[in-house]
Image (spheres, rainbow, N blue to C red):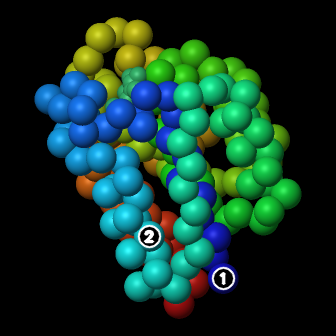
Amino acid sequence: MTHVLVINGPNLNLLGEREPGQYGQRSLQSIEQDLADLAEACGLTLNSLQSNSEGELVDAVQQAGRDGVDYIILNPAAYTHSSIALRDALLAVKIPFIEVHLSAVSAREPFRQVTYFADIAEGVISGFRGEGYLLALQAIINRLEP
Ligand code: DQA
């Protein structure tokens, strides 16, 4: 069974209250519930985690390698623009991943236009608020063997 892990970085636990003009009105819990529903309907195993700590995110990626996770959906949040450690973890485990951003990072401040992940991701989905995670999961489903 295909196993998908959804990883969210710092401050994404505040979705719904945090800058709704940028990140939308939906809570992370509600987005994760939609992902779980779609995964279940398509026969996938899906787990989600969020952490504000770079080390915990690195540990989660390493654990995903040991657990045989097939795909990662990753919003590194602010670590998008800084974390060589998280990038190296993804390169180490070689798990294909889709980078997701709720906001349109390429249309924001110059520092947000730099991503340490886009060149090693399967693809990047940005600017669709919470729907972006579902688009990423749908892309994974579309790539599965029939
Ligand atoms: C974000 C964009 C990042 O620049 C920011 O630091 C976040 C969220 C997004 O989903 O749009 O925390 O990754």
The residue at 22%/25% (across/down) is: 19
Vertical side of 125 occupied by 108: above or below: above
Which is nearer the eye, 23 or 93? Answer: 23
Q: Position of residue 54 (x, y in %)?
A: 65, 26
Amino acid residing under circle 1: Met
Asked which secondary structure carries label 2, the reply is helix
The residue at 38%/75% (across/down) is: 38
The residue at 43%/28% (across/down) is: 11
Image disc number at residue 1: 1
Vertical side of 33 occupied by 131: above or below: above
Q: Which of disc 2 and disc 1 is earlier in sequence?
A: 1
Q: Which residue is mark 2?
A: 36
Asked which quadrant contains residue 42, the reply is: bottom left
User: Is the N terminus in the top left, top right, bottom left or bottom right quadrant?
Assistant: bottom right
Which is nearer the eye, 30 or 5? Answer: 30
Asked which secondary structure carries label 1, the reply is loop
Which is nearer the eye, 104 or 43? Answer: 43
Q: Position of residue 7 (x, y in %)?
A: 55, 46
The answer, for residue 104, to whether it is visible in the render is no
Asked which quadrant contains residue 46, the reply is: bottom right
The answer, for residue 109, to whether it is visible in the render is yes
Vertical side of 12 occupied by 80: above or below: above
Q: Exactly how many numbered labels are in the figure?
A: 2
